[in-house]
Image (spheres, coloured by chain):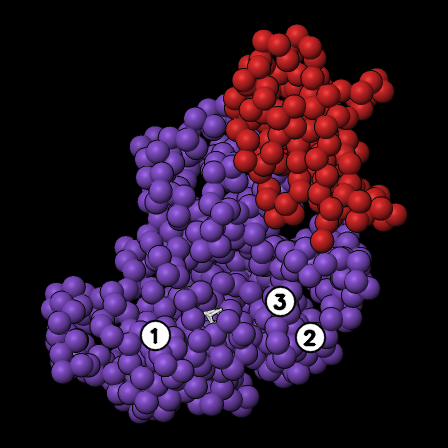
Chain colours: A red, B purple
Amino acid sequence: MDEIQNPTSLINKDYEEIELVTLDDWLDNFDELSKKGVGLIIEPSDDVYLIRDQLEFIELIALDFKNFDDGRGYTQAYLLSKRWNYIGEIIGVNAHLDQLQFMLRSGITTYQLLESYKGSNEEDYSNGFSLCYQAAANNNGLNLQY
Amino acid sequence: MYKYSEKDTQFLIERVDQFEKQLNRHLSGELDEDKFRSLRLRNGLYMELHAHMLRIAIPYGILSSEQLRALADVADKYDRGFGHFTTRQNIQFNWIQLPEIANLLRDLTDVGLHAIQTSGKATRNITADPLSGLTEGEIEDARPYCELIRRWFNLHPEFSWLPGKFKIAINGAKLDETALRIHDLGLRLVKNKKGELGFSVYVGGGLGAAAMVGPETASFVPVEDILSYLESTMRIYNLKGRRDHQKKLRIKFLVRELGASEFARLVDEDWQETKDDPELKLNLKELQSLKEVFALPIKPLSLDGFKDVADFNYGIWKKNNVRNHKVSGYSIVNISLTKPGAAPGDMTSEQMRVLAKLADQYSSGELRTTKRQTIVFPFVRQDQIHKLWKSLEEYGLDSPHQGTLAQIVACPGRDYCDLAKAVSIPIANRVQERFNDMNRLLDIGDLNINISGCENSCAHHHIADIGLLGMQKKGEEYYQITLAGETLHETNIGKKLGPSVSSDDIVDAVESIVNVYIDNRKKNEKFTDVFKRIGIDAFKEKVYG
Ligand code: SF4
């Protein structure tokens, strides 16, 4: 079994530690938290449309991929990144090795693998395909076949 | 004939390499059973009690002779010398050894065949009318569109982990051979008043326990906008589909719960945000070049003065198995593999090689597979049909059963499938034995009997004239009967006749149903029309009376 972690803070690209709050927390305490500068941890069942107009106040967003077969995170990543142009980091947490390329192409900017994948060859899965057949949030480095 | 490019082949190889790594991680204990299950199904691998089954896609039901030979080699090298053609344009190998799978798949990449998304919770292989391009009155050949849509959803990053499986069918012909409205998503090529080409979209159809005819969510989506519309449909499904209930994973449950018009509204709302994105427009240049490669390899022939051979057996076979072609001088020849004692859809490696050879000789090297588990030669010159028949006779492939009741569709059932509740193939064989008189078969005419071994409905029993569904009652095998399912002119799910019937009595029940049809039909009246006219009670009386 995977040991799911619930991170309470994450490091952003400027190496600053950012506190994470849940979506409910964020919505309930928007005035306070938006001034303070926090990150959001989004569960697969969370409705990201609720933060569509608040993205500029959010320091970073962590999408939780703990459930292997639950693909909602990919649509959440696409909406945040491609459709709503969120410019902060979108971090896939509790990530699974075999899904890395799907996550990265959907708009995840970085990821934290589950413990159980420590020592695996990430390249095989984050970069396993050299070409792609569809537009996506991030097709960098891929040979485009569409 | 359409062939994958070097880049496509490269992609197939990369997919096999990745799958091999996943398999090895599983075999060494690094990848747990649950995750591996999800991953292996995405590449067509079922692990069953006694053996492992691999499902290979046959896109749009089309095979080149070269591909069929490669499948024959696979059957010999990795299986027990045969393969099973399914109702959904796939071939399955039932006796595969795990460590050999990657090599098997590598062998097939050479001829552009693969197992990508033939199962699992993602977009499955897209199906089209196997007679695409061959018959009169088509709006357009659907295959170039199928191919562009298939590519787009090939390991799509956003939609590869959907709540449930997602089957798409696309039809461009007048009659709906694809049964598009019993698919998760069906597309019908249509022209609007201005003569522009587009698609009508139907979402949420399905067979199984809650069989449903998919409602229309859009009456006209312009061709160039279809990818964004499909993405929006899948996006709503991905976000809102029922992931909490194993039996409600398919999109039909979401459509039913929300109501078709609310579902369509949500899709439309999302679509308004993406439909003008130039990246999501269908690549019309690529479409044009696909139309050229899918174009028929034959030109009209004039066979003035040609008179076909008069021969009794040949005449019967020809009447049942040969259909008109839209190109003059040519015919479409159906080859039925039905034989007493043989499983419907099964083909030996020897038969595959014979058919490949004959396809080279008589059909421009191309064959097609149908949902009635037959093989079609799409390009046979009319003056060569007799010669072809002679060759088929020599190899025992001249069954005249096509288009008769004996051409039964059956899933593997309990003989091969761990999910089965009852056998399918032996029932098919018993019905064939009962109706083994050719005069009687000819008199009855075209009548579909489909037999599924469980509610997964792989043999599409809901859309057959007579559908049989295997089930268990107090440890015994029983069959539920449904009547008058259809998709060709309109889509109707078969109606339940009454209580299920025991294995011992099922063939008598089928015969009673056929007799009610024969006794009541007016000239040339189809089964479904008789059923609508006289009602279900007439059948009930005879079966249960
Ligand atoms: S219908 Fe059921 S028994 Fe038949 S092949 Fe499908 S899953 Fe197996």
Drawn side of residue B464 relative to residue A116, left or right: left
According to the picture, the residue beneath numbered tag 3 turns out to be: B46
The secondary element bearing badge 2 is classed as strand
As drawn, B347 above or below B289: below
Same chain check for tags 3 and 2? yes
Q: Chain of mark 1?
A: B
Q: Earlier in the sequence, mark 3 or mark 2?
A: 3
Kind of residue at disc 2: Ile
Task: Give the percent coordinates (x, y) of residue A20.
Answer: 69, 24
Q: Is residue B418 visible?
A: yes
| C-alpha distance separating marks 3 and 2 | 10 Å
Q: Chain of mark 3?
A: B
State yes or no: Cβ of the residue under disc 1 lies below 8 Å from any atom of ligand 1: no
State yes or no: Cβ of the residue under disc 3 lies below 8 Å from any atom of ligand 1: no
The secondary element bearing badge 3 is classed as strand
Q: Earlier in the sequence, mark 1 or mark 3?
A: 3
Kind of residue at disc 1: Leu
Front position in the image: B488 or A26: A26
| C-alpha distance separating marks 1 and 3 | 25 Å
- Image quadrant assignment for residue B512: bottom left
According to the picture, the residue beneath numbered tag 2 turns out to be: B96
Q: Give the mark toward the camera: 3 or 2.
A: 3
Q: Is residue B361 visible?
A: no
Q: Residue at x 64, y 56 (%)?
A: B38
Q: Residue furthest right?
A: A119
Same chain check for tags 1 and 2? yes
According to the picture, the residue beneath numbered tag 1 turns out to be: B468
Q: Residue at x 77, y 31 (%)?
A: A110
Same chain check for tags 1 and 3? yes
